[in-house]
Amino acid sequence: MKILNAQKTGSLIFAIRKEQNRTQQDLANELGVSSAAISKWERGIGFPDVSLIEPLAASLGITIAELFKGERTENSVDIEYESLLSDVVKVSANEITKKKKITNWIIAITVAVLYLMISVISHKWEITWVVWIVYCFYRIFTEYIYKKY
């Protein structure tokens, strides 16, 4: 049984949006995405980012389960089931955010180390390089070391 079907989900998003007399731009503004993203979802070309699942379902007035299934259900979804889906969506979104944050830090530290190496090799200490290095180490201290205490 295939649970996620972008075509069915897109058709449901389209139908409910039309029922609510809302434009793609209205929904896009509410969710903080482009109207092109809404268009892609509705045409079944893409699926909303995991961080948008809960706000999208709430905006449409449906459950997460209904959004995933791409159809409204007559019987109410078990509260525990809906809560579990909500938790899975939140954990997934948090994991994605954490991975993006780690990637950003790896890039920032790499740039800082490169600036440091260039400064040592060239014996030139550009003020922007020094500021960048100090900023990176300040962020590391405040976000990772200081928060532990």
Image (tube, rainbow, N blue to C red):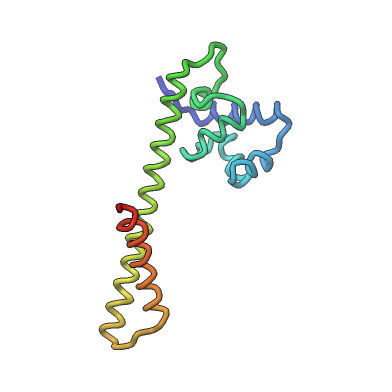
In the image, what residue occupies the spot 70% across and 38% down? 23
Q: Is residue 102 above or below residue 3?
A: below
| Foreground pick, 73 / 12 | 73
Q: Judge whether 91 appears above or below 110 on screen.
A: above
- Which residue lies most toward the front here? 149
Residue 49's place in the image compared with 111, above or below, is: above
Q: Residue at x 40, y 76 (%)?
A: 131
Most extreme residue toward the top, as rendered?
A: 75
Q: Quadrant of residue 95?
A: top left
Q: Is residue 122 left or right of residue 85?
A: left
Tally the marks: 0
In the displayed structure image, the side of residue 11 where residue 129 appears, left or right: left
In percent of width and height, residue 39 lies at 61, 40
Residue 93 screen position, x and y as percent: 42, 40
Report which quarter residue 143 is drawn in.
bottom left
Q: Position of residue 31 (x, y in %)?
A: 59, 41
Residue lying at 40% horizontally and 42% vertically, measured from the top left? 94
Toward which corner of the image does residue 90 lie, by quadrant? Answer: top left
Of the pair 130 and 113, the residue shown nearer to us: 130
Q: Nearer the viewer, residue 102 or 149?
A: 149
- Depth check, front residue: 105 or 134: 134
109 with respect to 39 (left or right): left
> Which residue sits at x=39%, y=51%?
100
Please state the horizontal and vertical placement of residue 50, each as a whole percent of the image.
46, 38
Q: Is residue 104 above or below residue 128?
A: above
Image quadrant for the N terminus?
Answer: top left
Q: From this viewpoint, which residue is outermost toward the right?
A: 21
